[in-house]
Amino acid sequence: MEATEQTQTAAGAKRRVELLRFTTAGSVDDGKSTLIGRLLHDSKSIFEDQMEALQRSSDITGGGEVNLANLTDGLRAEREQGITIDVAYRYFATPRRKFIVADTPGHVQYTRNMVTGASTANLAIILIDARKGVIEQTRRHAYLSTLLGIPHLLVCVNKMDLVDYKQDVFDAIEADFTDFGTRLNTQDITFIPVSALKGDNIVERSTRMDWYEGPILLNHLEEVYIASDRNLTDARLPVQTVIRPQTPEQPDFRGFAGQIASGVFQVGEEVVALPSGLTSKITSIHTLDGDLETVYAPMSVAVTLADEIDISRGDMIVSRDNLPHMESQLDAMICWMDEQPLNPARKYVLKHNTHTVRCMIRSIDYRVDIENLQHVEEVGELKLNEIGRCALRTTAPLLFDAYARNRQTGSFILIDEVTNRTVAAGLIAEPVKEPPTPQFEEYAI
Amino acid sequence: MTVDIETYSLSHLQALESEAIHIMREVFAEFERPVLMFSGGKDSICLLRLAEKAFSPGRFPFPLLNIDTGHNFPELIDFRDRRAAELKAKLIVRTVEEAISAGIARPVPGETSRNRLQIPTLLAALEEFRFDCAIGGARRDEEKARAKERIFSFRDAFGQWDPKNQRPELWNIYNGRLHPGENMRVFPLSNWTEMDVWQYIAREKLDLPSIYFSHTRDVIRRDGQWLPVSDLLPLKEGEEPQTLPVRVRTIGDISCTGCIESAAVTVEQIIEEIAAARVTERGSRADDKRSEAAMEDRKKEGYF
């Protein structure tokens, strides 16, 4: 069954169908693609022509079983080599939620893709082969998921069928992961024993693991509480463009358009435009469907202000009593994504929200060895798929919050000025200096 | 838009709408000469609505472009022209026919569908008007190769998509930088499914070409599909046209667009029908059935 915009709860109350974005990481061997295939198949999201295409495709597994992994491996080279090269996005829905799955390969050389998939996810599924337990790759996935600020981790101990569905195997893995997980900065970890191949605890509760009483996979994806994942505290509107119709009906309309990065805005509220520091009041929040009184992240809006102040793309409208940092020197974790290594002698283009500046890397403080999570100091460059802590200087101040507090205003990408390729993802660290206290005398012109 | 000030939550449609509006505005801000692909089909009708919303109360700042195969359902062309006129938008039409006469598009003997011939026609149109960005209504749920394509999909000077050399796309930060001659295809509906599109049409009460709804039509059964009888579809031996209540789920070249048997005459009935459907919408397009990688190959040549 498919979702409509609202769904009826048992109590009869209308509830909205929410969007949950999750990422899956794991190698082919962990049965990741099989797990996604199983979720799609058992939630009736695979259609007859897709099944036919699967049956037509050459690699049907032994015993006449369709290889569910082929549902997600879309490119010819992937099918030929039996690997996943790129992030693939999959969609399915239940009456409760609509799901966007970023399916990413798990090998070390694909850190780039994992980071990409993780950047927008509410939840990460980490797959562990029950026979192998927690391995380096598991730690890498967990580390990257928490680094990228994914609020919920779901550890699926897969291939339980191959360990006779034994509880002690599952318990040992849970203890092992928990021991390691305490060193990660994450609050919510859930463990589920599954067999993707046989369908145990994916959509239907397994009858072969009576000892397990926790949630099953689809159930957990439908129930996990995501409303508090968003930052609703720090009101931030990065301005994308200014809408000025200049028509006879709307001669003076100036709407500052953008997608609210975090927080809540209300008509009548006092706001500050940065970097100018000029204050004003929100007079209206316009949409084609009528004006609104209250708006919040991640809505796309156009606001009008009481005063005619100069605001353009790259500026930010924020709450008067809660300001972001405004610095041109900052520290960040940089995930390098290009074949050409980071070269500190070069300048890069930095895009942060809607603001594009140039920047230089002043120093690489350390690199994180993602095999053992140790810090390696005295590194001269960052190569493809390496992650390091860097000090940057930008040509104009950035308006930001630390990534750990605000994924939207704490992130940026780096672009090579010559090739135009996106070469890195940046996660801004909490600066030592406090954000400015709201004292507008200093700013006001 | 309904606002929920108790939980500050958004429905999935609101979240998808907001994402698409953000993408439209990024296109406007980052490109010199963007164009919006408008065929009159249901996905591009949603795109047009989102463009209206993104720049309201102003008008959306893109001209519309349609690559006309000449193998059309007339209802679609009527709708396209009417909708563009209603919105007072500039509509540019470039036809495969003209491209063939000019020697830009060259049909292969025996090729009946003109979908492939749209590629050189589109590339020539982009060049003619020096468009650096084309906004399209493609969705990732349509096909396996599309599932791996970025929202901002970079194309080289030949319009080609290189799946192994795509720009990483993180958060909601898009990299729209280009060298002269290169261009970008942007897909604001990337994260929408067929069901989302229909729910949005229902919510926004959007007008559609009549062929999306049940009507009677002469069709023949070929390769497991009901194909519409037209001058462009020579009957093979033993093929008997039948008159059936049908509708189309996706619209392409008329010679390869399959109809489905349907009694659905309202958007709500279509939504019910799709909820129960057991075949994807692309399953009714003969052009995608040719090989496992048909779409991937066409995209590499410059297809949407």
Image: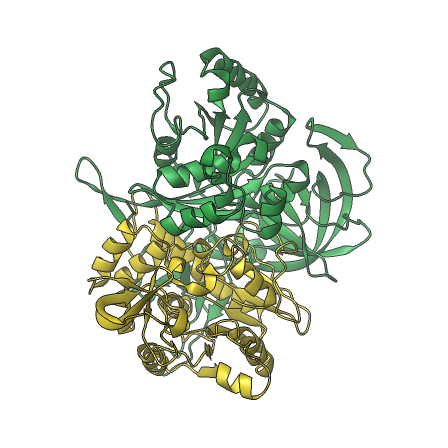
Q: Quadrant of residue A270?
A: bottom left
Residue for point 35% across, 36% down: A222
Task: Return the x and y of residue A111 as percentages of the image width and height.
Answer: 64, 40
In the rendered view, does A351 fall on the left or right side of A200?
A: right
- Which chain is displayed in yellow in the rendered image? B
Is residue B206 shown to the viewer in this render?
Answer: no
How does the figure colour the protein chain or chains?
by chain
Residue for point 26% across, 61% down: B202
Is residue B120 shown to the viewer in this render?
Answer: yes
- Residue sticking out furthest to the top: A168
Q: Colour of chain A?
A: green
In the rendered view, does B240 fall on the left or right side of A138?
A: left
Task: Return the x and y of residue A144 as percentages of the image width and height.
Answer: 60, 35
A253 or A440, which lies in front? A253
Please tell me whether residue B73 is drawn above or below residue B224 in the rendered image.
below
Please tell me whether residue A329 is drawn above or below residue B202 in the rendered image.
above
In the rendered view, does B268 fall on the left or right side of A132?
A: left
- Residue sticking out furthest to the front: B237
Task: Return the x and y of residue B241 as percentages of the image width and height.
Answer: 27, 72
A271 or A178, which lies in front? A178
Locate the C terminus of chain A by quadrant.
Answer: bottom right
Q: Quadrant of residue A226?
A: top left
Please tell me whether residue B87 is drawn above or below residue A149 in the rendered image.
below
Task: Return the x and y of residue B274 as percentages of the image width and height.
Answer: 29, 54
